[in-house]
Image (spheres, helix red, strand yellow):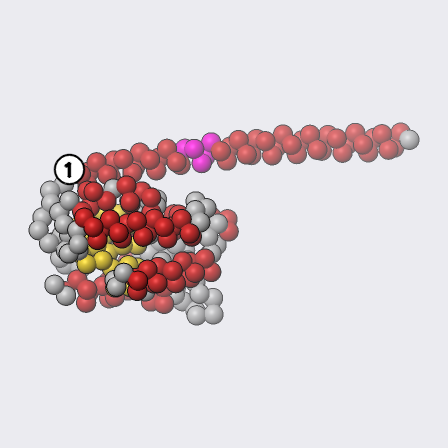
Amino acid sequence: MKRLTYISLILNVLIITLAVFLSYFLNVAAKVKSLLDRNFQKHYERQSQIFEGLPNIPGEIIFLGSDLIEEANWEELLSNPKIKNRGIAGDKTAGVLNRLPEVLAAKPAKIFLLLGYDDLTSGISQKEILNNYQKILEKIKKDSPKTQIYLHSLSPINYEWLGNRIKNEEIIVLNGQISQLAEKYRMTYIDLFPALVGKPETQELKPEYTNDGVHLNAQGYTRWKALLERYIKDE
């Protein structure tokens, strides 16, 4: 009897300890997420204000999206002074939709769009992502009907980013839907996935193109550039 009481006491202590640890962990995780969200919001606001203060020029070519767009110097990479970078790291389809008035103010000649990673990692459904995509495309067509729109596929990653929150299988499915949107709206679809993938059997980002499994290095952007040059020169 005493032995059972002793075992029960130990189990209760373990359960209480586990509950305290779990509560602490969840609290820390919530604080980290809150901090990241605040930092992104500040970055989003800063970049949006900077973009709004920049002058418009005739025949602008806009690169629009999140991390992979923001991190490249497209004007130099593609040797074209008309190119403007409108990428904001961490941005989502809803964020881009919100800042379209600034993007469309100059009635740009072309827009190269790449979006979806941060929607997926935030748990936003593919249905909502595609709904926002359609709103973006419809607004561009309405407010700047002469703008040519180029839709990128998402590139692969070479590990399960952020604790299984995004996988290449999800990216492949979303890419198929983006391709269908391009066909529906008669827009050019630029398929980054096969250009940047390593071994076809793994469907992962080629290691030579990245230093963290997700973002592109100089080699990765050079490979991407090769896909873009024909569309930039076609003016």
Query: 15 above or below 151?
Result: above
Residue 80, percent across and down?
13, 57
Q: Secondary structure at mark 1?
A: helix
Furthest residue in direction right, as rendered: 1
Question: Image point 45% across, 57% down: which residue?
Answer: 170
Q: Main secondary structure of the magenta part?
A: helix
Asked if residue 129 shows in the view, the reply is yes
Measured along the vertical axis of the image, is residue 3 above or below residue 85?
A: above
User: Which one is nearer the viewer's eye here, 87 or 8?
Assistant: 87
Q: Determine if the magenta segment contains residue 228.
A: no
Q: Is residue 128 above or below residue 175?
A: above
- Front residue of 40/211: it is 40
User: Looking at the picture, how far across and down is residue 218, in whole percent?
Assistant: 28, 58
Question: Which residue in the protein does label 1 denote?
Answer: 53
Q: Which residues are magenta?
A: 31-35
Residue occupying the point 51% across, 51% down: 164
Q: Residues within 10 Å of mark 1 (few under 14, many from 20)?
A: few
Q: Residue furthest bottom?
A: 200
